[in-house]
Image (cartoon, grey):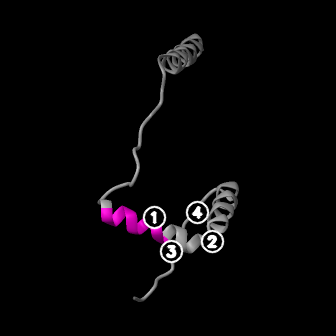
Amino acid sequence: MSSVALNIKVDKELKRQADAVFSQIGLSTSAGINIYLKKVVASKGIPFALTTNISDEDDAMEMARTLSRKAINDAW
C-alpha cells in the first residue's frame, strides 16, 4: 500500500492531547488518524453520533442576545 501525506490544521492543544492519548495506547498519531479514517470508510460515515446538546436555556440565552443586539442596532 502506498502512502500520501495528509496536511491538516488542528488546534495546538488538541494535537498535544491526542498525541498523549495515542502514545498511552502505543500508537503514533499517524496510526491513530489512519484507524479513524479506516473506520469512516468501513461505516460509510462518521463513526460516532454527531449531536447538539443545546438546552432550552441555551436557546433562550441566544434569543436574548439576538434581541439585545437588534435593540442596540435599532437605537443607532
Specify few, some or many for label 2: CA neighbours under 10 Å numbering under 14, 14-19, or 20 or more.
Answer: few
Amino acid type of disc 2? Gly
User: Pointers 2 and 3 in contact (CB under 8 A)?
Assistant: no
Separation (CA) of disc 1 from disc 3:
13 Å
Q: Is 19 located above or below residue 72 in the figure?
A: below
Residue at the spot x=56%, y=18% of the render? 65
Disc with the residue nearer the chain's start (2 vs 3): 3
**Left or right: 69 with respect to 47?**
right
Residue 45 in the figure: left or right of residue 12: left
Residue 75 forms part of the magenta stretch: no
Quadrant location of the C terminus in the rendered image = top right
Q: Nearer the viewer, mark 1 or mark 3?
A: 1
Q: For residue 6, which numbered disc appears in the image?
A: 3
Task: Residue 55: give x, y in percent of width and height.
Answer: 48, 22
CA gap, disc 4 and disc 3: 10 Å
Residue identifier under label 2? 26
| Nearer mark to the viewer, of 2 and 3 | 2
1 or 3: tag closer to the N-terminus: 3
Q: Magenta region: which residues?
A: 34-42
- In the drawing, what numbered circle is on residue 36? 1
> Which residue is pictured at 63% across the width and 60% down the height?
18
Q: Residue furthest bottom?
A: 2
- First reached walking from the N terminus: tag 4 or tag 2: 4
Q: Quadrant of residue 30?
A: bottom right
Q: Amino acid at mark 1?
A: Tyr
What x and y, as percent, mark residue 22?
62, 65
Q: On the image, numbered disc 4 is attached to which residue?
A: 9
Query: What amino acid is found at the position of numbered circle 4 in the picture?
Result: Lys
